[in-house]
Image: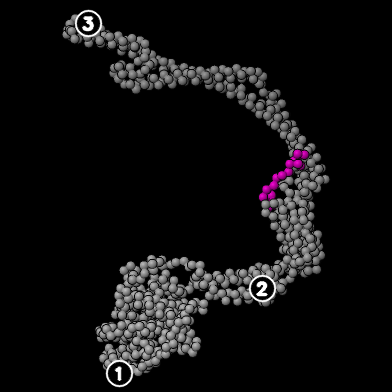
Amino acid sequence: MEQNLDVENSPVSNLSPHILQRPLVEPKIFFEYLQIVRYRLVSIVVTMVGIGVLAFILASSMDQVYKATATLEIEPKTKQLTTIKDIYENSNFSREYLNTQLAVLNSRSLAYQVAQRVGFAEKLSHVENPMSHEVFSWQSYLPQLFVDIIYNSQEPQVQPATPHLKQIKVKNSMIKMVKDGLEINPVPFSRLVKISYESSSPQLAAAIPNLLVEVYINSGFESRKNITTKTSSWFVSRLEILKKKLQTSEQMLQIFLEKSDLLGSKKGGSIAEEQFAAIAADLRDAKRHELEISILYKQIESINSSTTDALLVIPQIMNDSVVKEHRLVLAKKQQMVAKLQTRYGPQHPTMVVALSELQSAKESLNQQIKTKVQAITNSYESAISKVKSIEKQYQNIKDELRFISRGNTQLSALKSEVEANREQYNLFLARVKQSDAVGDLQADNRQMDNARLIDPAETPILHSWPNTKLIVAKSMAFTFVMGVFLALLLDFLDNTIKGVRDVEVKLRTGVLGTLPLLKPSVKGQGELDLGWLFLRGSNSQFNEAIRTIRTSIRLSDVDKSHRIIVITSSVPQEGKSTVAMNIALAMGSMEKTLIIDCDLRKPSIAKFMRIDKNSAGLSNLVSKTQKKAACLYAVDGSGLTFLPTGSLPPNPQEFLSSQKFKNLLAELSQQFDRIIIDSPPSLTISDSFIVAALADAVIYICQADSTPIPVIQGTMVRFLQSQTPLIGVVLNKKNINQRSSYYYSHYGAQVKDGIKSPLH
């Protein structure tokens, strides 16, 4: 079946617009979270108190532990002193250096030295297995059988311990006894370090931090002393190596000078360098001239023309003085010919002479242009030859300089090596003398220690653990937080309708009213008495809720009269029949009302009326075996009339779909102002949908904190698809807190109920 629902065009569109515009999922408001916690507050508080008492008992049974703390200041990093100046310029301090010193303080070597000073070795000498001394062993809490299984599943056990192995175990146990209770914490944004130790002995708690500081300072002093000694030894050995290296380089220089013939080479090299510079300048000028003339030559070659007039576009030819004179003569001849043409004909002697002179001027100009072009070509060829000649001279001088430079380079290298070795030897010789002096100073100066004790650890008077108040407070606070978390988690996992807001948001429909949870055993009420609760007026809160539902139903009649109303629910035991009975009683106090029991499978209204289930009723009227007077029952004190099911038909769906049932329903709607039909649950039975198709409206009963939301949504969609107006939901059996009774106790009419005999 198609489950998509067009809300705008469905019958639910008659609800208020602000409900239709709500999102399907809305976040809870803060007040709702408080209500969730409040609902389970008693359980949370009881659990919290129980955990607090248990924590108090456990804390009281713990052994007392004392804690003492010493404050250490770590000085800036000490440089490797090589001069007297380095002693007074010692301010190199960084976060990496501080972390390194903290790691040194927490090292195994210092812990072992402290353990030796304290005397842990004597304490462990009589212990057969030193590693088990004062160490928590989870195996002791397990039966021996499980311990054997665990150890047998691991690697095979080693052979009995040798004296060397036992000594290693004793050492590891001593280190563990120190490190287990040791705590080293740097003070933020400072060079201070807090060193604390926890022990069941207050004297030991104070002794170990002080001993650790002392061992740390002494280790730094010994380390610097060893470094100074090693540095001096290295300087001396290195000095001997440098001395031999210097002597070797001097001997190599002397041998080279004796074997090579570089006399006067320096002067000859200077002359060759001057010639090389002059030739290089000439070569640059020649190449520049070649480039200029080659551009002009290529430009002439690019002008491929049979006449010389096209060459006049070249500036070097056009601006030539001789060419200019011939062009001027040609221009004058052209003017004369033009002037004579106006007076004489072409065969006139004067005209013939003028034309001959003009032709002679043109030939002279062309000859001069050719001469200029030839001169440019010759100049181009001459420039190429000159460049080649100069390049040859340039290469010869370059080879000569390379030969001279090769010898000078080798000589310079040997001299540089000798100078470098001599300088390095002199530097190391000075450093050796300074290192000896600084080493003597460091050996006698304890003020250069890399740390100093600011506050020594004192013997504590009060124990630091267990802090009973803190343990109890934290355990109770943790229990409370976890309780709140679990309460919210359970609410999140609960997918049932819990309140009005859930109906409006998740079902997207209105709420006609909310009925409180009623216990039949209260005040002698039986299960059947709940159907008459409105008429009796014994529960003012319930009665006021029924009146609210009645008002909501009457207000829904504004656009269309809802004369026939079907009341249904998703599953059984949601209080559908009880609600239908009380709504019918409420409507009967204001108008002529008929309640019909259409649950042809398991009728309930007849039980409220205390009549025989086989009494004449709906089935008899439809089959016309009884008259109306024999099937209708009136209720004293109200305008309500009851129509039971009568004999149960073998096929209820065919019975409800029959035309006779439709005709009977139409006939009764003319006789009564309001007809309330109690139909069966609609999740697994389709009877309600058949009856709803004949009704004017449907009221849906939903039990709070019980029916899953997907079940309700699926059933409501089927009603909306049948085009039956769903005027709202009644939230039944809502567990309302006693404070929520408001002022309902002031209301309630004292009316006694009764049932008349069947009308005949």
C-alpha separation, residue under disc 2 versus residue under disc 3: 143 Å
Q: For the residue carrying disc 1, how many other residues have a C-alpha within 10 Å: few (<14), some (14-19), or many (20+)?
A: few
Residue 263, x across and y down, in percent: 67, 19
Residue 674 appears in which quarter of the rendering? bottom left
Question: Picture coordinates of residue 67 (x, y %)?
Answer: 74, 63
Q: Is residue 9 magenta?
A: no
Quarter-of-image position of residue 362: top left
Q: Say whether residue 324 is visible.
A: yes
Outermost residue, top side: 349
How far apart, in angstroms, are the residues tagged by discs 1 and 3? 162 Å
Q: Is residue 88 above or below residue 286?
A: below
First reached walking from the N terminus: tag 2 or tag 3? 2
Q: Which residues are magenta?
A: 82-100
527 or 648, nearer to the observer:
527
Q: Residue at x 32, y 70 (%)?
A: 10
Q: Going 28% across and 85% down the picture, which residue do you hit?
A: 671
| x then y, percent, for residue 682 | 37, 80
Determine which quarter of the picture holds residue 475: bottom right
* Amino acid identity at mark 1: His
**Residue type, mark 3 in image:** Val
Dot 2 amino acid type? Ala
Task: Determine which residue is flagged by label 2.
Answer: 55
Frontmost of labels 2 and 1 is 1
**Where is mark 3, residue-wise?**
353
Residue drawn at point x = 73 percent, y = 49 percent: 75
Residue at x 82%, y 45% (from the top left corner): 444
Q: Which mark, by number, is residue 760?
A: 1
Which label lies toward us, 1 or 3?
A: 1
User: Residues at badges 2 and 1 in contact (C-beta under 8 Å)?
Assistant: no
Q: Secondary structure at mark 1?
A: loop
